[in-house]
Amino acid sequence: MHMRLQERKARDAAFALALEELQPERALMRAMVEARVRAGLTQAELALRMGTKQPVIARLEAGRRSPNIRTLRKLAAATGSRLVVRLDEAAA
């Protein structure tokens, strides 16, 4: 995490909470990029395999577009990955 982000997080409880709430989205974006890279694909190659366009993949990986389950299934198939969706019990 960038130092300024850490400093702001330490000073501002509301900011820290908002950042924490974004953690699942950030983890999903990382997982999508990692699956593509693991498969040795460029964004354009992944898009072709998924039947979409490269800018769509770029928006997904940047978090500017939220994927639905159907899109995640296509991404998993295109990268030779296995899609796992899980809801865990909230910490007390």
Image (cartoon, helix red, strand yellow):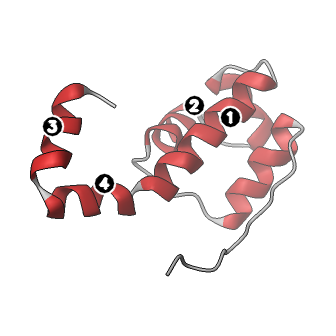
Residue 37 to residue 73: above or below: above
Instruction: Please tell me the numbered disc located at residue 47.
Output: 1
Instruction: Please tell me the numbered disc located at residue 19.
Output: 4
Camera-nearest label, 2 or 3: 3
**What is the spatial separation of the Cα atoms under label 2 and label 3, in whole angstroms?**
35 Å
Q: Quadrant of residue 53?
A: top right
Q: Relative to 3, is 34 on the left or the right?
A: right
Q: Nearer the viewer, residue 55 or 5?
A: 5
- Residue 69 position within the rendered picture, expressed as x and y whole percent measured from the top left: 69, 65
> Which residue is label 3 attached to?
7
Q: Quadrant of residue 80?
A: top right
**What is the spatial separation of the Cα atoms under label 1 and label 4, in whole angstroms?**
29 Å
Q: Amino acid at mark 1?
A: Ala
Q: Amino acid at mark 2?
A: Gln
First along the sequence among labels 4 and 2: 4
Residue at (73, 63) in percent of width and height? 70
First along the sequence among labels 3 and 4: 3
Element class at badge 2: helix
**What is the spatial separation of the Cα atoms under label 4 and label 2, in whole angstroms?**
28 Å
Residue at (75, 45) in percent of width and height? 75
